[in-house]
Image: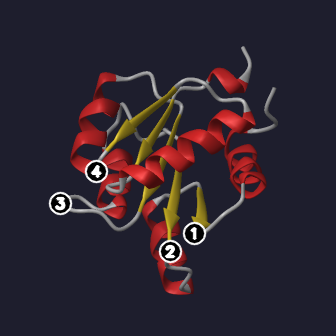
Amino acid sequence: MSKLNTKILVVDDYSTMRKIVRNVLGQIGFSNVDEAGDGTAALEKLKLGGYGLVISDWNMEPMSGLELLKSVRANNALKDTPFIMVTAEGKPENVVTAKEAGVNNYIVKPFSPDVLKKKIEAVLGPLG
């Protein structure tokens, strides 16, 4: 099965950013993309199963991307789900915090389609 069939959950409290990420994923070749407006909604969707990748914003209310990541890693059924954190914060301490929480990769906004593709391939392996 092509990795481009992977079901991806895009999590961001800003609908325009979800749309941008979804469009970029479409340009890369992914078509099975779902969205959640915050970490709480994302966790509920993840518990239903079937997702092969989470791309989540860090700064959200009421549950941040970091809290979502920690919840995913603490859940036996979800703990191996690949997780990419997206944030406007490029501070080294944030990257370290995310790595310690178990993030697979990290993207600083703004980013190009090529950067997103490279980060996804670093997590999932070559696409196509």
Q: Nearer the viewer, mark 3 or mark 1?
A: 1
Which image quarter: residue 23?
top right
Q: CA distance from mark 4 to mark 3?
A: 7 Å
* Image quadrant containing the N terminus: top right
Earlier-in-chain disc, 4 versus 3 = 4
Residue matched to label 3: 62
How far apart, in angstroms, are the residues tagged by discs 2 and 3?
A: 18 Å
Question: Residue 109 got which mark?
Answer: 1
Q: Which tag, 1 or 2, sits closer to the chain's start?
A: 2
Q: Nearer the viewer, residue 19 or 90?
A: 19
**Spot occupied by residue 49 in the image (x, y as percentages of width and height):** 37, 23
Does 19 sit left or right of 74 as displayed? right
Instruction: Assess whether mark 1 and mark 4 are in contact (beta carbons under 8 angstroms).
Output: no
Residue 32 is drawn in which quadrant? top right
Q: Are marks 4 and 3 in contact (CB under 8 Å)?
A: yes
Amino acid type of the residue that numbered disc 3 sits on in the rendered structure? Pro
Whether the residues at callouts 1 and 2 have beta carbons within 8 Å, the answer is yes
Write down the residue under mark 4: 39
Decide: few, some or many residues near mark 1? Use Cα within 10 Å; few <14, some 14-19, many ≥20: few
Measure how far apart labels 3 and 1 are at the Cα level: 21 Å
Tell me which residue sits at (49%, 79%) in the image: 89
* Disc 4 versus disc 1: nearer the observer: 1
- Residue at far top of view: 1
